[in-house]
Amino acid sequence: MKPVLLCRPSWRATYRSLDEPFYTSQSYPLKHGVDMVALNMWPWPTGFMGHIPNRDQSIDIGNLGATSSADYIDGVLVIWCARPKNGSEMVIVGFYDDARVFRSPQEHPELTSELGHSANYQAQSRKAVLIPENERHFTIPSALTKGKVGMGQRNIFHGLNSSSNWYRSNLESRPIADALRQRIYDYVEDMDAHRLPDTAPHGTESRVAKKSISYEGRVDRRVILNERGYRCEACGWHVAEEHRERWASGLDVHHLLPYSALGEGEEREVDLKDFLVLCAPCHRAIHKQTDHSDTRLIANDPGRPNQ
């Protein structure tokens, strides 16, 4: 049975930007204007690295099934739940699946560099799901009293696990805890379609003699599609979320910077602005014109087939 750890971050839209507005009742971010969960859904080179708002204290991972001497435990389902500004209940905003949870806070050098002061994380995973704001409906109870199960005033809660001291001490609440845990398992399975790409939308490309491999063929398509959207930026053909598993393959990632313009051994940095999302017909059509960056020519072509 996969251990579950409930964590209470601030409420954010994406958890991928230091600049986006957030809502929280926690004292530290309000006092200092710094919220270390700001990039919990950003894919660092080593995966997603989540700050757990626990006052930089150790987590008793024995409650998740770890041995007393272990520094971390793997295979944890970390559930991020928060309360919106005008809401009365906490809801799931995202989760890490198959995560590693550390007993002690770990130094986060990348986030430290971004914030300009020491930062840490205690959860790490290659599998992260962010629930869109308008789909955050799974409620996590706030009650933590006899016969009830919920977060209470805590920022973390491990009482859904049979290895937890709280679970063992609250016999009357066990059936409720078991039912909530199973509902969370089912919800996580249903929400897997929202999984985030675990690589960032930027990189370095170079040209080597006799090895002209197109960057369009090497880039992680999911990263670009996730950031720019599942819509052809020439003709407007759109793949709705419920049809992406079947039809997203009809969208290509188009490189605005001609790969052939690179000299031998030359390198350049590329990021999101250097790509377009095009449907397959528009992608082929744009390569038949002189300007590979002007989508107006194919968008207004009367001979373009209807999608």
Image (cartoon, rainbow, N blue to C red):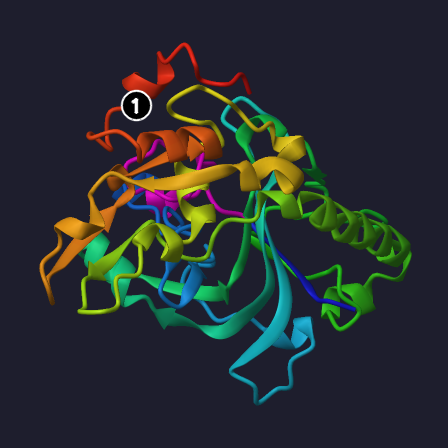
Task: Pick the residue in front: 241 or 167.
Answer: 241
- Quarter of the image for the N terminus: give it: bottom right
In the rendered image, residue 277, in percent from the top left (x then y), is placed at 39, 34
Identity of the amino acid at label 1? Answer: Thr
Q: Where is residue 31 in the image (x, y as percent from the top left)?
A: 30, 42
Q: Nearer the viewer, residue 114 or 61?
A: 114
Q: Does residue 32 show up? A: yes
According to the picture, the residue beneath numbered tag 1 turns out to be 295
> Above or below — where is 241 with respect to 164?
above
Q: Which of 133 and 65 is in front in this view?
A: 133
- Compared to residue 41, the image places residue 19 above or below, namely above
Question: Over which residues does the magenta segment extend?
Answer: 8-29
x and y, in percent, of residue 156 in the image: 58, 56
Quarter of the image where the C terminus is located: top right
Q: Look at the image and say whether residue 27 sits in the magenta stretch.
A: yes
Residue drawn at x 42%, y 61% is 49
Give the image quarter of residue 105.
Answer: bottom left
Q: In this view, does 215 lie above or below 140?
A: below
Pointer 1 local density, CA inside 10 Å: few below 14, some 14–19, many at least 20: some
Q: In percent of the image, x 55 and y 33: which residue is there?
A: 132
